[in-house]
Image: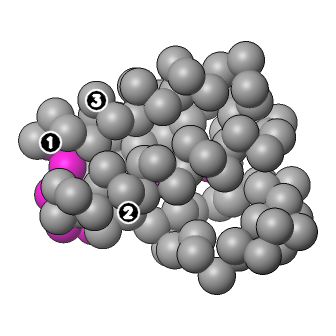
Amino acid sequence: MIEQADGSLRVTVPMIIANARALLEAGRGLLLSGKNTGLTLLDLAAVSEVDSSALSVVFAWLRTAGTGGIALRIANPPANLISLATLYGVSELLPRA
């Protein structure tokens, strides 16, 4: 679901409503584990499908990271995620690597 290695978190499943709760909890757990400090990359290269719930999950992770003093940056965002963020007027809130 989410792999952690070398200062990055790599999502490996579709970011859709069916996975949203599990992704949210897994990501929060990893961000709060103490293994991530400073800059952490959220690598979305392996994400094959997104829906609007993906934005909610990413924004929740950003809030969690911020409270833990972690600068979370998004790498390889799927085009659909960027399109949704643009549609909703929040693309400037996605910190890209």
List x then y, in percent, for residue 63.
37, 57
Which one is nearer the viewer's eye here, 59 or 7? Answer: 59
Classify residue 79 by image quadrant. Answer: bottom right
* Residue farthest to the left, as pictured: 34
Secondary structure beneath label 3: helix
In the image, is residue 65 above or below residue 51?
A: below
Mark 1 / mark 2, whichever is N-terminal: 1
Do the residues under discs 1 and 2 have CB atoms within 8 angstroms?
no
Classify residue 78 by image quadrant. Answer: bottom right
List x then y, in percent, for residue 56.
61, 47
In the image, is residue 34 above or below residue 80?
A: above
Classify residue 92 by image quadrant. Answer: bottom right
Mark 3 / mark 1, whichever is N-terminal: 3
Residue 29 image label? 3
Q: Residue at x 31, y 50 (%)?
A: 64
Secondary structure beneath label 2: strand
List x then y, in percent, for residue 88.
81, 67
* Residue farthest to the bottom, as pictured: 92
In the image, is residue 25 above or below residue 15?
A: above
Q: Does 39 appear in magenta? A: yes
Residue 72 image label? 2
Where does label 1 land, which residue?
35
Residue bounds of the magenta highlight: 35-44
